Image (tube, grey):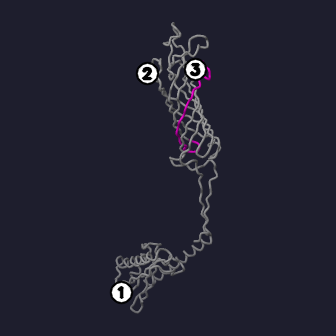
Amino acid sequence: MSADSVTITEVRNADKFKVETNRFWSNWFIGAGVGGQMLFSDHNKQMKFVDRVTPNFEVYVGKWFTPGLGVRLGINGYESHGVAGWTGHKAGSQSALDYYRGFLTKEVYGKEPGGGYDLYKTKIEYLHGHLDVMLNLSQMLFGYNQNRFYSFIPYVGVGWISTLNKASNPAEYVHGYRNDGYSNEVTANVGLNNRFRLSSALDLNLDIRGAYINDRFDQQVGGRWGEGLLTATLGLSYNLGKRGWDRSTTTITRVNENVLADLRNRVGQLQLTNDDLRRQLEQALNREVTPQNVCGMPLLVTFPIDRWTISNRDRVNLGFLAAELKANPNMTYVVTGYADEGTGSKKRNVFLAQKRAEVIYDCLVKEFGVSENQLRKDSKGGVANMYYNDPRCSRAVLLKIAE
């Protein structure tokens, strides 16, 4: 079959919402960022805004499972500043530190706005580990685009926050046990990552995160619903390994109809030839054989390329021939093996021709009980097309009456 008789076409899926998923180690990323943070606790609202903002850092690693769904494991922290107010609410010196709780620095920030008690500065050093589930809504709502400049990525997650320094005046009891001065709390997180594509490998990220923490975190239990930690960082992320996703393709193979018709005709001719040979063999077997009337028909057994295994269909024909030979002890057949010279080396074709003649010879002798005196074995190696200009007819063994 010539090369121009077959046409192969690849059709790419045009649906922008369908992509092929990648292996597990694809679409990973790492990143880091720096920015600011603000703690919302019992008395911090009485501070000036600029005094509440402190530095914050963030490092993380994550993976996108699809263009729209990913996870991220990260850690952020440093220190947050706040104030502690007088919580004793009983007679005594309002400036006495015994009435204050938390991570006190023993430095007075100022007076409570009402002109009452002193406000003492606090400093909480902490680390916050978190696991986030991210949704790239830009890819989910508008379809996959590997070169999209801006991506809107909200996320939710859970975390664990622990203080690195010890509260100078800790809350008396936490979870019913005496407090050791260190805070360890579960967090609930929600945030928005604004991602800007710089290249296929590098992205700029503006990440805004809000974390909910139990009221015990700052060691000042004031009966609030809880405390909040707001962080905003600007940083870079690097995409590891395979980046992006491939669209599925469909391969269409078209074969020239004239070529198909020619192949069908060849197969039909071979089938007719085999049917004619079977018919002649059956007629020969059914004919009454006398010393004056002995006729042996030739038999052609073909093989697949580079093979010498006899099919069950050919065994049937060999069985008919064996019966004829055993009924006529004076009849002698030559078993000649051939190979197609157009395939394989000369040495290989000699080997194939010998093996094919050998298996036919052994089948007649060992399986059907034909006398070795009635058979002669021969092989011709690789030969040109013998019948119908078809090389398959040359991968064969020809059995005919010896001259």
In this rendering, the answer to whether 326 lies above or below 178 is below
The amino acid beneath tag 3 is Asn
Q: Is residue 190 magenta?
A: no
Quadrant in which the C terminus is drawn? bottom left
Q: Is residue 58 magenta?
A: yes
Identify the mark at residue 329; answer none if there is no mark: 1
Q: Earlier in the sequence, mark 3 or mark 1?
A: 3
The magenta segment: 43-69
The amino acid beneath tag 2 is Asp
Name the mark nearer the viewer: 2 or 1: 2
Element on which disc 3 rests? helix
Name the mark nearer the viewer: 3 or 1: 3
Q: Residue furthest bottom?
A: 292
Element on which disc 1 rests? loop
| Image location (x, y in percent) of residue 120 | 54, 16
Element on which disc 2 rests? loop
In this rendering, the answer to whether 368 lies above or below 202 is below
Q: Residue furthest front?
A: 107
| Image location (x, y in percent) of residue 217 | 50, 23
The residue located at (50%, 13%) in the rendering is 97
The amino acid beneath tag 1 is Pro
Q: Which residue is mark 2?
A: 180
In this rendering, the answer to whether 152 lies above or below 356 is above
